[in-house]
Amino acid sequence: MLGVYFIDLPVYRLPREEYDAAIDEHVRQRIQGLDDADTTLTQSFLARNPHVEAQWRHAARVEFGGEWKYNEIIGFIEMHFLGRQIRGEYWQVSSKRITRTRRKLFKHQTWNLANELKIPERATNAAIYDLVKGYVAACSRALKGRYIDTSRLEQIGSYVDWVSLVASQAH
């Protein structure tokens, strides 16, 4: 990568809410049993052994794929400025089919996920930040059906001296 790198944005297979609903359903099914007789026996056993239920819930969550925050990442957009352009290199898991998994190998997919955006010569910090957010929105359209976590960018974006950051590569 050339230019000035400024943040990696994680790309997820699906949003946290969808994953949480799926994992909750998986845990419920694993603990409830397959039929009514199993459910009654299981519930009776768990009522007498509450510590076992916590262990089963944990094991079912791990079996499903673990917590969403890191385990559902399928790629990263490496954001940087190249000259007066905003670009994002995309790295994605090396897999023909993207499913929930615990084994990942990331490989480079493209030097520029969406069409680069040109930063005007006298752009302000706010204008550059708006362009960065616009570029991320274009990446989201390019990765249809995926979720880009922009929370860290949103937390720091209005505090960054974007003008100096863009200018820093010229020296």
Image (cartoon, rainbow, N blue to C red):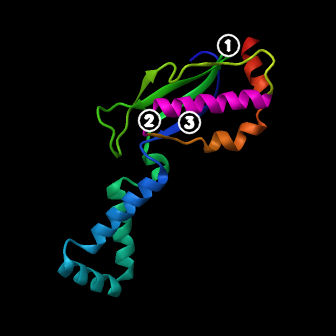
Assess whether mark 2 and mark 1 are in contact (beta carbons under 8 angstroms).
Answer: no
Spatial separation of the CA atoms under disc 3 and disc 2 = 16 Å
**Mark 3 neighbour class, 10 Å CA radius: few under 14, some 14 to 19, many 20 or more:** some
The numbered mark, 1 or 2, whose residue comes first in the sequence reads 1
Q: Which residue corresponds to mark 3?
A: 9
User: Which three-letter amino acid code belongs to the residue tagged 1?
Assistant: Gly
Q: Does the magenta stretch include residue 64?
A: no
Q: Position of residue 106 (x, y in %)?
A: 41, 31
Q: Which residue corresponds to mark 1?
A: 83
Q: Position of residue 38 (x, y in %)?
A: 20, 78
Picture quadrant of residue 92: top left
**What is the span of residues highlighted in magenta in the rendered image?**
125-145
Q: Does the magenta stretch include residue 127?
A: yes
Residue at 74 percent of width and 24 percent of height: 165
Spatial separation of the CA atoms under disc 1 and disc 2 = 28 Å
Picture quadrant of residue 160: top right
User: Which three-letter amino acid code belongs to the residue tagged 2?
Assistant: Lys
